[in-house]
Every structure is written in C-alpha cells, then in structure tokens.
C-alpha cells in the first residue's frame, strides 16, 4: 500500500507550482529549470508525477538550448497527459527545436546521433534529420551506413536535391561504378526542382 | 468613382472582384470560371497574378480536383513564394492529397499519380509511402514494394504500420520467415507506448 500523502507538503506544492507559470511568462528560463527540478523532487517524494511540472521542465530546457533534456521532458509530459493542448503545442515546438539543432550541429558532434536516436524513437525525424545523420556517419567513416540511409531518402524523396548531392558525393568517395548515373540524376532533379514551394519537410 | 486608363484593366478588376465574391459565397464552379477568366485576361495584357492562381487552386480543391489544385497552388507560389494565403493553401491541399492517397483503395490507379505529385515537393509522409507500398503490392510490383517498405522502416523505425506493411510484402513474395521477423518488429512497437506525436495536421507537421 503506498505511503499516505503528506497533505501539508501537498498544499505547499500547490501553492508554489503556479509560480512556475509566472517564470514562463517572464521568460526566466534558468530559474524555471531550477525551481521545476526542486518541485519535481518534492512531488516525487509524495508519489506525485505531474504533467504540468514535466511541461515546465521541457519549456525551460528547450529555451535554454538543451534539446535532449527538452525532448525527454516533453515526452514524459505527453505520456501523462497526451491531449493537453499546451503539451501538444510544446511537443511540436520542442521536436522542431530538436530537429533544427540536430541539423545545425557541426558534423561530428556527439549530439547528432543522440538526437537522431531520440527523435527516431518517437517518430519525429524528417528528411533533413536523416541527411544530417548521414553526413555525421560519413564524417565518422561509416560510409556503408551513410549510403544505406541516403539511398532510403533518395527512394522516398527523389526530388530532394541535398539527398541527391550527398548520394553523388558518396558514389565518388566509394568510387562507385554507378557514380555517373547519380551525377545525371542530380542534374535532372535540379532542373525539375519546383520554385517557391516551401523547403524540405519530408516527414518520413 | 474609380476609373482606369485602360478599359481592359477596368473589366479585369470587375471580373476579379466577382471571382472573389463567388469564392467567398462558396460558389466554386462559378468562381473557378471567373478566376480563369481573370488569368486569361491577365495573360492577354502580358501580366500574371499569384492571387489569381491561388483563387483557382482553392476552387479546384473545393471541387475535388486535387491534382490540378496542387499544380496550380505551386504556380501561385512560383509567382509569390511569400504569400501567406498561398502558403496556407499549399498546406491544406497537400494535406488533402495525403489524406486521399492514404484512404485510396490499394488498386486505385490514381495512387502513383498522387504519390508522384507529393514526391515532387518532398511532401510525402509515412502513411503516404505506405499507401504506395500497398499499391505496388496490389499491382504485383513486389520488388518495388519491398524496396520502398524497407526504406520506410529504416527511416521511420517507430512506425508499427511500416513494419506490418513490410511483413505483408514479404509474405506476398513467399518470404514467410522474413514476414514473421517484420511482424515481430511490429509487435515490439505494439508493446511500446503509442506514438506520442500529436496528430499534426500540417497547415497543421513536423
């Protein structure tokens, strides 16, 4: 039988938790992160797992540029309350932020495979993430893995210029006898590329 | 009173105003005809309009001609890639295309056409790819179906549906052991939590 909740402790938590929202509104992310962690530890001690606290943590990590922690926290929040509008909105923002960070990281950064694995696990990668990961694999000398990934991207998104260019580069690196074919395909795709349509957003 | 130095322009603005009113009143067939007239008159005087293409695309979409609507909204974006209404309509039409392909019968001949359209703009998503896998399998193009299913499971390993589609293709090809393996992968996803991602209707993801 679980230990009974300390009602006085719960009341204190309930009095303090609305202040986190004030920190969100004030944009005081560092204090939000610290205060949320403190309240979370106290809530956990009472056997309370709060979606609201997880949401606050996710927002703080997201704004402080800590994408892996942000994704972890927002996933936790979504598990606890998957239909809460604030959580679903934050889920989108946090995942978008993580994707952007993954793609902007310098090739070779350990954050790339970490974020890629995390986003992949929750089905939130897109074509740009796959290509960033392929670049990372290439940088790490994992040419076969990069080629497998890029081949899959080219198959599902044959109009993607970056994928074609990377495939062509991989063909040159590996001295693939089909390199000329990839050159021709890349040129063809470039000629047919639609103008004005919003950029790559393939969501596989 | 608003006057125009050129009678052709005066007439053009009359038709454009009417096209807009008809669209607002949801008289899509008439509005489409009016927008087309606007476009033709513009061409006659050597002009173009992203707005006219947008109106044409919206009407085509409402009338159910998704393929033409998608082509036309791209034409609108070529003319004004920053127009918020064109960008929004692009998302709406792309969503409808994705929905149409995902709900199409596997043997529906429109599937490859719609899939090709979405691929042109990198707008295909996992359910779209899987609809194409089903189509390829149903039309006995098993090698292509297997290759596409394999690519989707590589790129979207969290998708239970993708593993099931791959298993189905393997089974159709007589690879019972492979099918069982892919079904096992699907079961792993079954035991996992449901996907956390909210249903992002783009225009609405990702």
Image (spheres, coloured by chain):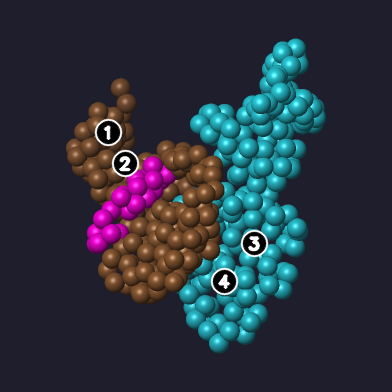
Chain colours: A cyan, B brown
Q: Does the stretch in magenta take in B104?
A: yes
Secondary structure at numbered mark 4? helix
Magenta segment: B90-112
Q: Name the residue under label 3.
A: A133
Residues at discs 1 and 4 in contact (Cβ within 8 Å):
no
**How much space separates mark 4 and mark 3, taking CA atoms?**
11 Å
Answer with left or right where residue B94 lies relative to residue B110: right
Quadrant hosting residue B62: top left
Secondary structure at numbered mark 3? helix
Looking at marks 2 and 1 on the same chain, the residue that comes earlier in the sequence is marked by 1
Across and down, in percent, residue A117 comes to 64, 55
Of A174 and A75, the residue lying toward us: A75
Q: Could you say which disc has been placed on residue B23 in the image?
A: 1
**Outermost residue toward the front?**
A1
Secondary structure at numbered mark 2? helix
Q: Name the residue under label 4.
A: A148
Answer with left or right where residue A167 lies relative to residue A21: left
Quadrant hosting residue B23: top left
* Whether labels 2 and 1 share one chain: yes
Chain label for disc 2: B
């Amino acid at each position: 039988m679980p230990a009974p909740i300390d009602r006085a402790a719960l009341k204190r938590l309930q009095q303090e938790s609305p202040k986190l929202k004030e920190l969100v509104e004030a944009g005081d992310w560092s204090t939000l992160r610290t205060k949320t962690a403190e309240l979370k530890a106290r809530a956990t001690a009472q056997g309370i797992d709060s979606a609201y606290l997880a949401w606050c943590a996710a927002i703080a990590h997201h704004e402080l540029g800590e994408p892996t922690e942000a994704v972890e926290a927002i996933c936790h929040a979504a598990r606890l309350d998957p239909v809460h509008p604030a959580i679903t909105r934050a889920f989108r923002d946090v995942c978008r932020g993580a994707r952007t960070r993954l793609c902007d990281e310098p090739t070779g950064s350990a954050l790339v495979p970490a974020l890629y694995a995390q986003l992949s696990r929750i089905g939130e990668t897109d074509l740009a993430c796959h290509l960033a990961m392929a670049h990372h694999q290439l940088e790490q000398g994992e040419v076969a893995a990069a080629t497998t990934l890029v081949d899959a991207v080219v198959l599902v998104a044959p109009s993607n210029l970056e994928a074609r260019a990377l495939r062509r580069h991989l063909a040159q690196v590996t001295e693939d006898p089909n390199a000329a074919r990839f050159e021709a395909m890349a040129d063809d795709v470039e000629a047919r590329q639609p103008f004005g349509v919003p950029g790559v957003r393939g969501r596989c | 009173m608003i006057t125009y130095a050129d009678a052709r322009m005066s007439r053009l603005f009359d038709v454009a105003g009417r096209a807009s009113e008809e669209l607002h009143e949801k008289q899509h067939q008439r509005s489409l005809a009016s927008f087309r007239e606007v476009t033709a008159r513009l061409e006659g005087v050597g002009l173009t309009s992203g707005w006219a293409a947008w109106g044409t695309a919206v009407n085509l979409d409402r009338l159910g001609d998704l393929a033409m609507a998608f082509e036309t909204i791209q034409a609108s974006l070529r003319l004004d890639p920053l127009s918020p209404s064109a960008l929004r309509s692009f998302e709406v039409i792309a969503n409808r295309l994705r929905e149409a392909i995902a709900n199409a019968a596997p043997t529906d001949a429109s599937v490859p056409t719609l899939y090709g359209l979405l691929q042109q703009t990198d707008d295909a998503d996992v359910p779209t790819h899987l609809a194409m896998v089903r189509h390829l399998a149903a039309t006995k193009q098993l090698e292509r179906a297997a290759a596409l299913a394999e690519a989707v499971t590589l790129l979207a390993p969290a998708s239970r549906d993708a593993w099931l589609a791959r298993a189905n293709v393997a089974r159709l090809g007589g690879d019972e052991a492979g099918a069982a393996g892919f079904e096992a992968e699907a079961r792993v996803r079954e035991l996992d939590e449901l996907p956390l991602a909210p249903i992002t209707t783009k225009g609405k993801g990702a």
